[in-house]
Image (cartoon, rainbow, N blue to C red):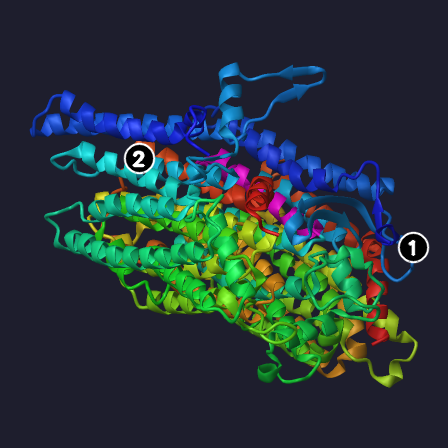
Amino acid sequence: MNFQIADFTRLIPEFLILAIAALVLLGDVLTRWSKGKEALAERTGEAIAMTLMGLGLAFVMVLIQGGFFNWVQIGDWKFYNFSIFQNLRTSGLDGSILGGAFVVDPLTHIGRLIFIGAAFVTVVLTGKAKPSNNPAEFYALILFATLGMIFMTAGGELIMIYLGVELTSIPLYVLAGYFRRDPVSSEAGAKYYIFGALSSAILLFGMSLLLGLTLMNGQTMNATPTSLSSVKTAVELAFANPEGPSQGVAILGLLFILAGMAYKVAIVPFHAWSPDVYQGAPTSMTAFISTASKTAGFFLIYRVLVTGFDAPSIMGTAAIGAPTSFGGWTSLVAILASVTMLVGNLAALPQTNAKRMLAYSSIAQAGFLMLGLVGTQRDSSVSLLMYLIAYTVTNLVAFGILALVEDNVGGTDFSNLNGLGRRSPGLTLLLTVAILSLAGIPPLSGFFVKFYVFIAAWQEGAKWLVIFAVSNTVISLYYYLRFLKAMYFAPAETEEPIKVGFGPGIVMTALTLLIFGLGIVPTWLYGVLEQATIRIGAR
Amino acid sequence: MLNEFIKFSDWSITTLIALSPLVGMLLALVFPKPAENSRTIAWGVFAWSLVPLGLTLFLWLSGGFNPALASVTGDQAMIQQVDRVRWVPFFNADYFVGLDGMNFPLVFLTTALTPVCILAAFRIKQRQNVYLALMLLLESAMLGYFVSLNFLLLFLFWEFSLVPMFFIINNWGGENRRYSAFKFFVYTMAGSVGMLIIFEFIYLATGTFDLVVLSRLAQGLPVDPALLAPKLGAGYSNGATLQSMLFSAVQDVGLTSVLGNSNGTPAAIIFWCIFVAFAVKLAVWPLHTWQPDTYENAPTSGSMIVSAVMSKMGAYGMIRLMIMLFPKQTNHFAPILAIFALASILFGAYAGLAQTNLKRLIAYASINHMGYVLLGLAAAASAAPESLGNLDVAIRTSALNGVQAQMVAHGFSTAALFFLAGELYERTGTYQLDQFGGLRKVMPIFAGIMGVAMFANLGLPGLAGFVGEFFIFRGAWGTQPVITTIAVLGLIVTALVLIRMYQKIFYGPVNHKLTNLPDIKVGDWAFNVTLPLIIVLLVFGIYPKPLMDLSNYAATVMAQVFTSL
């Protein structure tokens, strides 16, 4: 169980990101180091280029390691990849390294792809933002946050999970408040930091309770006491003996962990920070926080719940009525889900700022996402992961295009979007697709994933929740259509088109095509996701 | 079990018919842009659009599609030329397309009209290749919609057909194009929200999207339980119907305390949601207000295709989803549907009288004609009076056949009218009726062609429009005598509307500005566009049997469902 030299290869993407982050910081010192306008532009350009190359390389690496490339066989001929790829592949797949702290399973691979991809898009979107005094730190922080998200997803052990959460959060606090001169941005940073620190404390407290539980059960001879598998055994033991005090400890630990993570992913009633932060942060950062950070949080919640707490006695059921009664964490998740989508949707209705409205819409989306968490059957797990992917892609487009508009127009109020359809039809089309996908209109991916979580929750027995969620989609249509109203109906102040760089244009178009692709052929991710959930133990 | 009502064949070409326009679309887009006035791409697209038409005609004439074929069990029409491939396994959904008597006439209508519309689009100068590519995309979406036998697939095509039409209006339309395009989009979208939710619920309650299975369930016919997703629904047992499965799902959810304990309530709610979605598309009063704006502001060839084919998507949806899945509810609410139909017929006709704009006038006449379609559907589903006796099936069948004939005939005649309206605009620069006058002397051939189209549209015997209206009224007299009596008024007023239009354009004193208009010459472009339309109108007017044969068996089987209720 010790660290082996072979573990290095399994961690190549992480080392790569770390190295690139260090290089970005160092390289900044080595270039023309001045605060003149030209020098700043050059330094920004170099930092962006290096970050993008690093992320791209890491992405390809994960694709290879995760076995997403296969041998091509045509007739009797078998085309092999380069042998170096083969070595990376064999070492990349599977295994719990660092003494079980870092789990390399398909779920981790999927998480890596999502986070690295989202970071890539974010960096492309920041391209036109004004360079600050130290551009390199901005990009290095994005890389560190990405690294933290991978640790969150891959963490098989409580300390690693906590470190991952912190490594993600601390750079994001800084990034949210990056425009120091802008009071809204500073407020966003400070608010994010205070709420985040508090939630970390709550999370840590829950973890310490679980550690106490595993130690109390005295089965630490062969296993790390903080690993999720020890937690699982301890929880099962605690519930096997209902008379003892340990059952309460297990429930408390779970509650605290859930509460701490609910802060991170902005679930009602722990959501109050998110509209302010989303609105105040630089828009490209909002895109990153609302997608990658939230996805990482859900991956973490999913892994902890499914590997640590899947004993039927603590899981309970979200179904009302016979044969089993309402109870356990699934019912808690179901209640949180219903409250989250209702509050998110209702609060989104009166907003006048597009970014703030999308923040509330993200809260509502988190509510829909949790429909995939009300059980651990395979459909639930697969639908949750599929929803996360579709949500990430769609929200990246929505926030990304808002960022591009903001660069030109200087604001994200609905009045800034007026007449966008006349000014930039192409850009408006992309935003329209993203908005309709968020609203769940077929044939876009948003529809399929929403429907899939409905089916999954229905099969888990939470039928009341499905009906509630369906009625919520109707509410959400109203505010999503306000986007279209502003863009197509309202008169434009000028006819001047929005200037969009080549990179952001290409990336946004590609992601929009992905929204279509995930919608029309929703099956092509199914196999991969199913593998991931089988490996992790979904039934 | 499946093979009893689905006929797989070794060389099914349904998919080829429906999706081949997509290839043409790609070709039109990637083909290097020729010189300014070159028609290379336009002719290429036109030639490509003949492929689906050729395939459809081949199926029809060669007997590859046999409209009179019954299923093995004899309880429904055999669905032929089937392609059925697993598509989304976790939704138990297949890519499932096939032809029967209810969709084949519409497939023919679509494939036949698209080449004409593409030919009519030669007038478009600005980014012509993109426009033509959108036309092919639209054709594919509509064909896909008509041939889909899976609810999910059908819904995708339904929503997707909005996209090309939106751009056609938005980018190439008339004065108010952006407003009209958006109104068109939002109306259809808002109309289908109810259906979207309802269709999710139907799946959760039954575990299948398969329209054939669902309609068998709805009629209480036996269904192979293996076709239903296992974990969903209340579980299929012998004798379960769609209505009872929906009700038990509502019971499961605990909504009975809200909806009451009546077995039929959930199905009735779903019925109305579906009706609203398709009534918007069919432009049934009072959901028609998008339609005159859209028809007026779309470019000529866009108006042609949206009025001729797209509005039929609504009627087809009513047949496939409303009548086939909810026969009891349709039967129960048929009088209300008939009243809506009557309102469309009368308001469409009288509003047409007040129009000064040529395109809007044709649009209101279309509302009137689509009212007959809805009347035919309501008549086929209505409870029959005792006195009908044995005539019952025949009456309903003739109403359903009339609906199909009316849809095809109206498609051809309205397309011709819109094309000629567009040509008038090209020649005179206006759609205002009071700006014309005496044009018969200036353009005699033009007047002749428009006369045929107009009379076909108002249903003069001998032209195709008469056949549909005659059969619809024949059916409607039997089951809805009162409403039909009043609806006759609509027939007269529409005739008045159209004849008045014709008179204002072609008779009276010649407007002195318009004395030098070029007439249509035999063999020129405009003549070639209208010729096939006129020929079809004449042929089906004199000899409608081939057209009626297409739908007759399917209509008979459907009529029997209602007689046995």
Q: Which mark is residue B72?
A: 1
x, y percent for residue B367: 59, 66
The stretch in magenta equals B120-148
Examine the image and state in which quarter residue B530 appears: top right
The type of residue carrying mark 1 is: Val
User: Would residue A251 appear left or right of A237 to someone viewing this image?
Assistant: left
Mark 1–mark 2 Cα distance, whole angstroms, equals 61 Å
In front here: A478 or B474? A478
The kind of residue tagged 2 is Val
Mark 2: few, some, or many residues within 10 Å (few <14, many ≥20)?
many
**Position above or below: B165 against B127:** below
Q: Give the image location of residue A101, x and y in percent.
A: 42, 40
Horizontally, residue B271 falls left or right of residue B83, namely: left
Q: Residues within 10 Å of mark 1 (few under 14, many from 20)?
A: some
Q: Is residue A240 visible?
A: yes
Q: Is residue B359 visible?
A: no
How far across and down, in percent of the image, does residue B336 sit?
66, 79
Q: Quadrant of residue A98?
A: top left
Q: Residue at x 31, y 35 (%)?
A: A124
Query: In the rendered image, which residue does mark 2 sit on?
Result: A124
Magenta: main secondary structure equals helix
